[in-house]
Image (cartoon, rainbow, N blue to C red):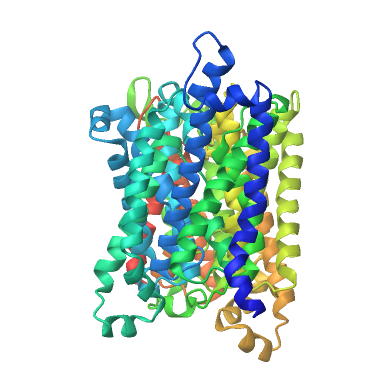
């Protein structure tokens, strides 16, 4: 009886306190201008009363749009989780919102006439394309929960790199869109409400019509087919509706994080078991969560040093919520086994290493001696040119080595070929600390920034250890914890960029992975650090050969698994932090290099580490050279080039796994 009552009244108990708090916040804000006048301003406005004008054209539309957007994102989250049978599916974790945002940014810059067709259709195309990439990465793993989330993170990083390219070269044109892109609910009329409300109403009715067919997806595929259900068309309809809702919301208010993930899981934990109950209660809770967050920001906005977009704040608040949800979610499928990825072994790995080393040497010589100058393309060995190019080549190669070794350690440790150093959130923690140092200290020196960044990386690593220690550092929990930290970093970055501070340009350049600021002493120091840290991985090769076989096998062979994982995680943290301090929080170099090394045939851990290190250095040297020459005299940072080229190759090469 107790369980039955909890299932019936638990969702109400979860929503009621928040509803009371939102109501109280509304009454407090309206009382400043008079409760009667505030309520009348919802319907009519007195032209000679400034407070009434503000309430009618700004405050009430903002409250309404927050309720609509929060409810819409929660509705989309329920649909995605039901179709994919994945409690971690949401518009943000699957890359839908970022894909829609990129499509709107690109259309605004290059083909603004398409916006006349409808912003929601442009956003729908972008969100649908991002979800298609996620499916391409995770389909062969049967859309396992962890794999879908990690594939969504890969797509988010790739789409984010494309958005960063647009931002670097069109910063003035996009300056007004930075706050909107971070999730802004500011309104100057009722037009956005008139745009969003009917679309969400139609989407809600469509979801209700699909309720009974979608409920059958809780069965296994064979049982659903036996009842005459077309799974392909049903999934397409459910996901298409979810993407449409997400696109409509993004086209109005920008990227709002975590509402679509948090609301469905909270009502599920509160006892809502049936799909109909989750649709209703999640929509209500999502509306209350976003409205409550926005009202809180409005209440304390004057005490804050900078403007904080509501979408960034929901992501910042949602990251701890995700950390709380992860241990309570049932993840029936683990990560893919990395052992099955080794489909090819090179017969002579030493010879292949030699060829890769020669290719790296040749790429370094080309990057040093060949390129564009004022007179055009030329080969130059002039010391003034070499003095400028040498630090950049060394910094790029050293960062590539460190990220590649860190990625190799992480992929073997987690038995997941889609893992990368940034999944742990170490580079994100380092980046947050460095941004704090740049903005809070009056004139920080390079040494001070190095110390601040290292401290940020170590604090993030300590939090990872504290959160995962009781669970035995299980790979899937560890990776999902990293997803939460990465989301927190994205929120902080959005807040920084939306503030309009002139130092934001330097932060953008560093975040995108530029070697422009590297000098010769720094490059030499980083190269030495890369060599020492890479050599430090050599004693762990036996562990790295055995750990992918599973915890039981590793324990039977005498390895203390928790201690081994802890040691390897510490080394990954040092490698990632050292690379992040030089060229920013890169990701695809650490993701791509170990993967390419596997495809080349490096099977044993020692060859895998060495091959990935050389490939990582080669990738970053080529990326830095291309970034300098592609749009000369303008530059594309090496990190963005590596992300764009390497990420595309990784998605294509994943078909062979």
Please report the residue visible at 38 percent of the width from the left and 39 percent of the height from the top. Answer: 196
The answer to whether residue 258 is visible is: no
Q: In this rendering, does residue 231 appear at all? A: yes
Residue at (72, 36) in percent of width and height: 449
For this view, does 489 lie left or right of residue 628? right
Query: 26 or 299, which is in the foreground?
Result: 26
At x 51% / y 73%, what residue is drawn? Answer: 335
Quadrant containing the N terminus is: bottom right
Q: Position of residue 409 (x, y in %)?
A: 59, 66
Q: Left of 398 or right of it: where is 128?
A: left
* Displayed quadrant of residue 29: top right
Q: Residue furthest front?
A: 36
Give the vertical position of 44 relative to 219 (above or below).
above
In this view, 328 is above or below 372: below
Q: Residue furthest bottom?
A: 556
Quadrant of the image for the C terminus? bottom left
Q: Quadrant of residue 358?
A: bottom left
Q: From the viewer's side, name the closer residue of 437 and 481.
A: 481
Residue 217, image x, y percentages? 37, 74
Most foreground residue, 438 or 214:
214
Counting every numbered tag in the picture gives: 0
Q: Where residue 359 appears, x then y in whole percent?
A: 41, 54
Q: Nearer the viewer, residue 368 or 159?
A: 159
Looking at the image, is 538 positioned above or below residue 203? below
Q: Position of residue 54 (x, y in %)?
A: 54, 19
């Amino acid at each position: 009886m107790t369980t039955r009552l909890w299932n019936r009244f638990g969702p109400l108990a979860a929503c009621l306190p928040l509803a009371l708090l939102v109501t109280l916040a509304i009454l407090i804000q309206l009382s400043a201008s008079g409760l009667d006048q505030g309520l009348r301003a919802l319907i009519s406005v007195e032209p000679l009363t400034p407070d009434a004008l503000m309430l009618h054209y700004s405050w009430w539309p903002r409250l309404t749009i927050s309720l609509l957007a929060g409810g819409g994102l929660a509705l989309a989250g329920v649909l995605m989780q039901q179709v994919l049978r994945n409690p971690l599916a949401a518009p943000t974790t699957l890359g839908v919102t970022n894909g829609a945002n990129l499509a709107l940014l690109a259309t605004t810059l290059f083909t603004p006439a398409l916006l006349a067709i409808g912003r929601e259709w442009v956003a729908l195309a972008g969100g649908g394309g991002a979800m298609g990439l996620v499916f391409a990465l995770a389909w062969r793993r049967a859309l396992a929960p962890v794999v879908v989330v990690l594939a969504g993170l890969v797509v988010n990083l790739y789409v984010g790199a494309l958005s960063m390219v647009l931002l670097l070269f069109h910063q003035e044109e996009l300056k007004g869109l930075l706050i909107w892109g971070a999730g802004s609910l500011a309104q100057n009329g009722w037009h956005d409400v008139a745009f969003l409300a009917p679309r969400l109403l139609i989407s809600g009715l469509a979801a209700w019509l699909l309720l009974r067919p979608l409920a059958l997806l809780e069965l296994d595929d064979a049982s659903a087919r036996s009842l005459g259900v077309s799974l392909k068309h049903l999934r397409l309809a459910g996901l298409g509706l979810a993407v449409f809702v997400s696109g409509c919301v993004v086209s109005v208010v920008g990227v709002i994080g975590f509402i679509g993930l948090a609301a469905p899981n909270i009502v599920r934990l509160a006892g809502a078991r049936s799909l109909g109950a989750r649709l209703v209660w999640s929509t209500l809770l999502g509306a209350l969560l976003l409205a409550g967050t926005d009202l809180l920001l409005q209440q304390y906005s004057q005490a804050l040093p900078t403007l904080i977009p509501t979408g960034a704040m929901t992501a910042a608040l949602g990251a701890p919520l995700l950390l709380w949800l992860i241990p309570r979610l049932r993840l029936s499928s683990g990560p893919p086994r990395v052992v099955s990825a080794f489909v090819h072994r090179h017969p002579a790995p030493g010879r292949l290493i030699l060829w890769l080393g020669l290719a790296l040497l040749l790429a370094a010589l080309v990057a040093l001696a060949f390129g564009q100058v004022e007179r055009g393309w030329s080969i130059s060995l002039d010391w003034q040119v070499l003095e400028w190019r040498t630090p950049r080549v060394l910094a790029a190669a050293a960062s590539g080595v460190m990220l590649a070794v860190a990625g190799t350690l992480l992929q073997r440790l987690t038995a997941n070929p889609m893992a990368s150093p940034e999944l742990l959130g170490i580079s994100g923690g380092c980046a947050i600390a460095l941004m704090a140092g740049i903005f809070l200290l009056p004139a920080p020196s390079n040494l001070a920034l190095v110390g601040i960044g290292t401290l940020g990386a170590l604090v993030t690593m300590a939090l990872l250890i504290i959160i995962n220690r009781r669970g035995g550092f299980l790979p899937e929990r560890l990776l999902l914890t990293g997803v939460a930290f990465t989301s927190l970093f994205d929120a902080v970055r959005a807040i920084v960029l939306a503030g309009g501070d002139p130092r934001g340009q330097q932060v953008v350049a560093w975040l995108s992975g530029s070697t422009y600021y590297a000098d010769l002493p720094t490059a030499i120091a980083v190269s030495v650090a890369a060599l020492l840290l890479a050599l430090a991985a050599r004693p762990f090769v036996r562990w790295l050969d055995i750990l992918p076989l599973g915890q039981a096998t590793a324990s039977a062979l005498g390895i203390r698994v928790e201690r081994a994982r802890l040691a390897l995680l510490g080394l990954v943290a040092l490698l990632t932090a050292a690379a992040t301090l030089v060229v920013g929080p890169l990701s695809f170099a650490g993701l791509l290099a170990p993967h390419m090394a596997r495809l080349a045939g490096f099977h044993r851990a020692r060859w895998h580490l060495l091959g990935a290190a050389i490939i990582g250095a080669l990738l970053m040297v080529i990326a830095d050279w291309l970034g300098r020459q592609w749009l000369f005299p303008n530059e594309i940072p090496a990190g963005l080039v590596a992300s764009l080229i390497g990420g595309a190759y990784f998605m294509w090469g994943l078909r062979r796994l």
